[in-house]
Image (cartoon, coloured by chain):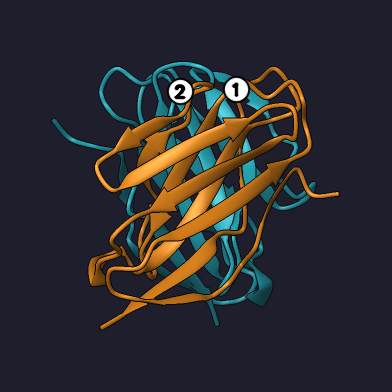
Chain colours: A orange, B cyan
Amino acid sequence: RKEVEQDPGPFNVPEGATVAFNCTYSNSASQSFFWYRQDCRKEPKLLMSVYSSGNEDGRFTAQLNRASQYISLLIRDSKLSDSATYLCVVSGSSNTGKLIFGQGTTLQVKP
Amino acid sequence: NAGVMQNPRHLVRRRGQEARLRCSPMKGHSHVYWYRQLPEEGLKFMVYLQKENIIDESGMPKERFSAEFPKEGPSILRIQQVVRGDSAAYFCASSAQDNSPLHFGNGTRLTVT
């Protein structure tokens, strides 16, 4: 089983739609969780950290379910500029601080 | 307030040559990570270093690849005797401490001909 798994998509949605991505992780001891965004052929950029109580940043909401070992990202009112690959990131199985990236979920927002 | 600096941006090597990729972390960051991304694939962890120490190299191929982060100067990822399969984007990232978010450099795109 992969340490971090995401549905690769692509998700094709119209502008204004709400879209949700899920990500599962295998290590129950993981402590740190993030969502990154990667545009084509560019470096990943931090979108938001994910906290136990859930957190929101504008149109983006992240949630963590430790019991089921998954995290989610909800994007409301999708914009064309949201088109990108969204990477789920989880701290690794060792205690070395290594972060493990999922393969990413591709979102394409269409006019 | 410079971010993570990687160079070169693009590197072309013939099979059998050596490739050296450099990474200077963000100011104040002492943790450096190297990731590799093959075309149409996700980021794969390679190695995690702190100053003068390799903390986790579980993602590094056993042969031809090495990494260092000396007391002075940038971190170096070295690939000896490159093969076509080494062609990829190599991203360096840094953080201030364990489990903190990573900040990525622009990457080095290695092409082996």
Q: Is residue A99 visible?
A: no
Counting other residues with Cα less than 10 Å from the Cα at mark 2, is it few (<14), some (14-19), or many (20 or more)?
some
Q: Are marks 2 and 1 on the same chain?
A: no
Q: Looking at the image, which residue is at 25% across and 83% down?
A: A111
State whether residue B41 is above or below residue B8: below
Which one is in front, B56 or A34? A34
Residue B99 image offset from top left, x and y in percent? 53, 22
State whether residue B76 is above or below residue B81: above
Circle 1: element type: loop
Q: Looking at the image, which residue is at 54% across and 31% down?
A: A33
Marks 2,1: beta carbons within 8 A: yes
Residue B58 image offset from top left, x and y in percent? 75, 37
Q: Is residue B105 visible?
A: yes
Chain to which the residue tagged by mark 2 belongs: B
Q: CA distance from mark 2 to mark 1?
A: 8 Å
Chain to which the residue tagged by mark 1 belongs: A
Circle 2: element type: loop
Which residue in the protein does label 1 denote?
A97
State whether residue B21 is above or below residue B34: below
Badge 2 amino acid: Ser
Residue A34 image offset from top left, x and y in percent? 48, 36
Which residue in the protein does label 2 denote?
B100
Badge 1 amino acid: Gly
Q: Quadrant of residue B10?
A: bottom left
Which one is in front, A4 or A43? A4
